[in-house]
Image: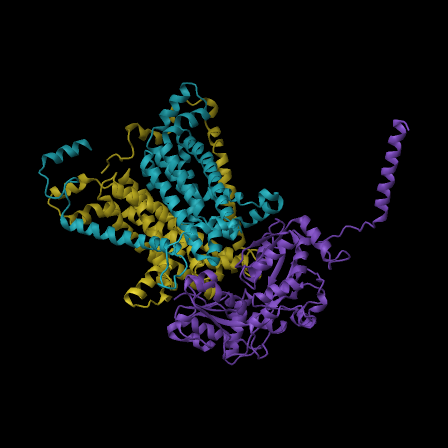
């Protein structure tokens, strides 16, 4: 063959090869991750591959020692190569919504939310519906039907305290005069889930119920007037520095402090108050409708609700929403579950209707936090 | 007395303010309106980043959510208990720490000025004051917690060495906040007031002494009246400083909206964004009004004081 | 002034009246007491910060805390912290540059050409003192929101805080530069330069500026101190400057946040002290400028 023929043949061969390649694979239509309501045909891998292209996911209010988020973030980045930008770790639920509104369109807005129920219900217009791959495992009562929000994990309301202060076993102990200036509630009840449920447990301890949290509000007003309750948001640092030696917070926040504070010479104890039924409340995951990284956001959601993600929460002393399904399937981390040692009494969990009513009452009455 | 000020080193300096007629060689191109043009960049910048936000706040304070004019937001200060309480707390705190800071700071000034003007003590104290006056907010809160917190230096010292258990609740009262605020008020007083004490001439003291007066009568008849305007001016500045402070209070009292600055921030970040934002602006407007009144009094006092210290 | 001193010399000086003579014992005791008490009050929290930040883990055997620099070393393990420090330093540099560019020509021009505007400029520069930072944030938030949405990544970067920082430093920097300007004869200098053929830029930058070095220096140092200490506006506009990061970090790890606060303090103190000791006239200008925490 002469040169010209060789070139033509080569070109023809290449063209045929390319055509064959192009023709054999069914090129899927590109997915618009901003509106995708499920992982779709490509499954979780497709979501996360698209997320990796986006490169980052913006989280908010996910402190490393809150339900083991630190471990979850590390594992997630290791598995999918998506960088996690964790902003404002100590923001409350309302702060998350405010940040989303204020930073809308800047690329810095949060991609996913982790909200207390009261705030979650009030802002459904901000979420994009999405059903994770393990959607079926989430009980119907624990999710919004189209996937706007869904429960993620829960714990129990506890009192954590520095043992050198003595013994505390119930809510009424907190009113003791020797605890003046030492009691802190984790967050403003009108803005955060932990604070909200702190009022609920106080209500239950003082003759109230899930429908009537007024006694709880009165209890905290009494503590404020006597100077026992201080207007400080507790955090690992405030506990270590001794600013808040008694903290009313979730078991998955107070629990890890035991190990964290031991090297600093503080013996931290955690109890579920004995004068009230155990209070539990699920937090809620939702995807920001206006997320700057929609695929990465959905990938994060898929990971959090996979067995690995749910077990990570379990290791952080939080009970994941798929616990029952995972126990049936045998995929649950038994050691972690045993370590939690949940109370045997059935916990009290407020329904959305009760939450709304309680929130209205709080917004009206929670105004007495002040200094003398 | 009309002695030339120590800061005016040459007599001709006074001609600087005498008027453009004496500055000679300006070309005719730059006379008149043209001169003012060169100030435009500055005026434009300040207009955009200072005046505009103030106008936005004022307009917002006077509007309802639908954009109509209303006085209800402004009136909300008096009709809402929480707002009024936070304003009163802020005013109380500002007055107490202004007086404390002025008195203690004034004494410190006196102690420093008695020493060598170029000495190490003075330079150290002035440099330290420059930093500590700026040392508000977050760092100050930490410093006090490191001192008086449950595991703080003083608390542990008292507990381990003297067996005294300290009750930390005082830090979260008005008293505690006042003590923390005073920490940056004293250095601020030093910085503002020291130059005035410097201006007190040794000759005046000598003259008074030579006429048979004691130290007390000097202060009462000579030093006091001369220093009074700048002392009062400094007091007013300290008041403004404490009244406007946000960071320190926020770092210590992270829950609740106790002072008016915190209340404004709370309204800005409240749940019902639209409705409360304008109320927050109304509170901000009230703050502007109060501080402006104080600054006007300050300016008036300064003009009187400048008679002595020029 | 000279005449009065001469007259004094002729009059017999009563005991204790001379500046160079030793003050009466009562006064000396009072002075010492005040210095010890007040400076003690100011120094104790700083010592406590030092002690707190150098606390190692509890030694169970002796029930004491050994000294350790682990908190200071840990500063570098927080990338947010390092980013925050860098962001604040950049904002500080830009603010100094912008403030000088804005203020120096304006003030010189005012003194030489339009002295009537001096009061107006002074008032405008004092205005930020009258408008608390929290109020400025409330008004400026929409502007920043617009910038973040329409100006891409630059619009959302903390460097945009420079615009507000320049406004915040105006009162202090104005007074510092003003003190310097009042101490030299600006009009004569300017006329001399102009009559020798220099244009206005050259007059300002090559003739007048070298003479007000002290004021410029202290204005710059004040600006740096203010930017490094600014919390309110950064926090409410959701920017991560050094104070915001310290605040957030303070909730996670108190030891590191106290350590980094101490470092910031010492840095600013050394800077101010060195400037005041070695720059001529700078310490007077610094004193004439009021300072306040943001």
Residue depicted at 23% across the width and 42% down the height: B200
Q: Is residue B250 above or below residue B119?
A: below
List x then y, in percent, for residue B205.
17, 42
Q: Is residue C83 above or below residue A364?
A: above
Can residue B71 be seen from the camera position used here? no
- In the visual, does C118 lie left or right of C22? right
State which quadrant residue C279 falls in: top left
Q: How is the image coloured?
A: by chain
Could you say which is closer to the camera, residue A186 or residue C164?
A186
Q: Is residue C151 above or below residue A163?
A: above
The residue at the far bottom in this view is A207
List x then y, in percent, for residue C156.
58, 46
List x then y, in percent, for residue C133.
46, 50
The quarter in which the C terminus of chain B is drawn is top left
List x then y, in percent, for residue A58.
61, 53
For the image shown, how many numbered marks are present on the structure? 0
Can residue C264 be seen from the camera position used here? yes
Residue depicted at 72% across the width and 62% down the height: A133
Tell which chain the image draws in yellow.
B
State which quadrant residue C213 falls in: top left
State which quadrant residue C216 falls in: top left
The residue at the far left in this view is C12
Could you say which is closer to the camera, residue B152 or residue C113?
B152
The colour assigned to chain A within the rendered structure: purple
The colour assigned to chain C within the rendered structure: cyan
Q: Is residue B210 above or below residue C262?
A: above
Could you say which is closer to the camera, residue B50 or residue A38?
A38
The quarter in which the N terminus of chain B is drawn is top left
- In the visual, does B80 lie left or right of A3? left
- In the visual, does A287 lie left or right of C229? right
- In the visual, does B5 lie left or right of A359? left
């Amino acid at each position: 063959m002469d040169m010209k023929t060789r070139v033509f043949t080569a070109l023809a061969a290449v063209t045929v090869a390319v055509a064959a390649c192009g023709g054999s694979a069914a090129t899927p239509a590109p997915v618009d991750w901003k509106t995708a309501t499920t992982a779709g045909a490509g499954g979780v891998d497709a979501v996360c591959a698209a997320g990796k292209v986006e490169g980052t996911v913006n989280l908010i209010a996910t402190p490393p020692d809150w339900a083991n988020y630190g471990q979850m973030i590390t594992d997630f980045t290791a598995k999918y190569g998506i960088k996690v930008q964790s902003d404002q770790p100590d923001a409350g639920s309302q702060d998350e919504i405010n940040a989303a509104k204020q930073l809308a369109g800047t690329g810095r807005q949060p991609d996913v939310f982790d909200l207390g129920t009261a705030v979650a219900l009030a802002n459904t217009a901000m979420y994009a519906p999405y059903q994770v791959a393990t959607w079926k495992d989430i009980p119907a009562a624990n999710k919004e039907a189209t996937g706007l929000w869904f429960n993620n994990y829960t714990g129990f309301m506890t009192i954590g305290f520095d043992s050198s202060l003595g013994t505390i076993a119930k809510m009424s102990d907190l009113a003791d005069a020797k605890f003046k200036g030492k009691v802190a509630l984790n967050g403003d009840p009108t803005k955060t889930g932990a604070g909200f449920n702190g009022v609920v447990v106080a209500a239950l301890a003082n003759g109230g119920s899930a429908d009537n949290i007024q006694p709880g509000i009165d209890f905290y007003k009494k503590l404020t007037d006597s100077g026992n309750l201080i207007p400080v948001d507790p955090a690992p640092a405030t506990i270590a520095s001794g600013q808040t030696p008694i903290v009313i917070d979730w078991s998955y926040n107070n629990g890890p402090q035991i190990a964290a504070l031991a090297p600093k010479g503080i013996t931290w104890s955690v109890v579920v108050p004995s004068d009230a039924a155990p209070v539990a409340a699920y937090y809620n995951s939702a995807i920001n409708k206006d997320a700057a990284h929609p695929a990465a956001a959905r990938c994060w959601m898929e990971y959090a609700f996979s067995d690995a993600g749910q077990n990570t929460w379990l290791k952080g002393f939080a009970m994941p929403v798929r616990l029952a399904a995972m126990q049936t399937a045998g995929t649950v981390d038994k050691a972690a579950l045993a370590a939690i040692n949940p109370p045997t009494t059935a916990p009290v969990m407020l329904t959305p209707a009760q939450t709304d009513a309680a929130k209205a009452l709080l917004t009206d009455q929670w105004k007495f936090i002040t200094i003398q | 007395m009309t002695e030339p000020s120590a800061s005016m080193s040459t007599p001709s300096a006074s001609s600087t303010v005498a008027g453009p007629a004496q500055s000679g060689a300006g070309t005719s191109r730059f006379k008149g309106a043209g001169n003012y043009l060169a100030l435009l960049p500055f005026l434009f910048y300040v207009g955009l980043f200072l005046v505009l936000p103030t106008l936005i706040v004022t307009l917002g304070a006077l509007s309802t959510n639908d954009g109509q004019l209303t006085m209800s937001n402004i009136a909300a200060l008096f009709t809402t208990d929480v707002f009024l309480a936070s304003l009163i707390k802020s005013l109380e705190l500002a007055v107490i720490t202004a007086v404390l800071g002025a008195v203690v700071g004034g004494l410190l000034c006196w102690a420093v000025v008695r020493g060598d003007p170029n000495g190490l003590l003075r330079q150290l104290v002035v440099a330290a004051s420059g930093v500590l006056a700026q040392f508000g907010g977050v760092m100050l809160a930490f410093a006090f917690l490191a001192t008086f917190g449950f595991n703080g230096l003083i608390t542990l010292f008292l507990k381990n060495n003297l067996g005294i258990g300290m009750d930390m609740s005082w830090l979260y009262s008005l008293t505690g906040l006042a003590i923390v605020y005073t920490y940056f008020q004293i250095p601020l007083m030093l910085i503002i007031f020291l130059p005035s004490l410097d201006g007190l001439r040794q000759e005046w003291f000598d003259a008074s002494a030579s006429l048979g007066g004691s130290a007390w009568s000097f202060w009462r008849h000579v030093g006091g009246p001369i220093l009074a305007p700048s002392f009062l001016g400094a007091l007013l500045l300290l008041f403004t400083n404490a009244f406007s402070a946000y960071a320190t209070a926020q770092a210590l009292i992270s829950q609740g909206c106790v002072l008016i600055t915190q209340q404004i921030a709370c309204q800005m970040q409240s749940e019902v964004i639209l409705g409360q934002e304008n109320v927050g602006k109304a509170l901000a407007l009230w703050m502007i009004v109060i501080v402006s009144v104080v600054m006007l009094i300050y300016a008036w006092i300064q003009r009187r004081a400048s008679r002595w210290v020029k | 002034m000279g005449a009065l001193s001469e007259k004094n010399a002729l009059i017999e000086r009563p005991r204790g009246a001379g500046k160079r003579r030793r003050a009466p014992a009562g006064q000396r005791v009072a002075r010492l007491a005040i210095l010890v008490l007040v400076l003690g009050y100011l120094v104790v929290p700083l010592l406590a910060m030092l002690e707190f930040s150098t606390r190692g883990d509890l030694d169970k055997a002796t029930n004491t805390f050994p000294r350790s620099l682990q908190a200071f070393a840990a500063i570098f393990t927080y990338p947010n912290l390092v980013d925050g420090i860098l962001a604040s330093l950049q904002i500080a540099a830009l603010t100094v540059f912008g403030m000088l560019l804005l203020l120096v020509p304006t003030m010189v021009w005012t003194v030489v050409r339009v002295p009537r505007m001096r009061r107006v400029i002074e008032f405008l520069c004092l205005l930020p003192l009258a408008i608390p930072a929290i109020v400025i944030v409330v008004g400026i938030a929409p502007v920043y929101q617009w910038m973040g949405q329409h100006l891409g990544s630059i619009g959302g970067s903390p460097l945009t805080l420079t615009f507000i920082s320049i406004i915040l430093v105006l009162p202090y920097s104005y007074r510092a530069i003003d003190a310097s300007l009042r101490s030299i004869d600006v009009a004569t200098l300017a006329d001399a330069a102009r009559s020798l053929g220099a244009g206005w830029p050259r007059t300002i930058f090559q003739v007048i500026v070298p003479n007000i070095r002290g004021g410029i220096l202290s204005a710059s140092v004040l600006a740096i101190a203010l930017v490094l200490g600014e919390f309110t506006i950064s926090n409410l506009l959701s920017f991560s400057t050094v104070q915001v990061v310290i605040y957030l970090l303070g909730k996670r790890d108190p030891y590191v946040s106290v350590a980094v606060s101490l470092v910031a303090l010492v840095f600013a103190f050394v800077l101010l002290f060195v400037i005041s000791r070695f720059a001529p006239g700078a310490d007077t200008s610094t004193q004439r400028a009021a300072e306040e925490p943001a």
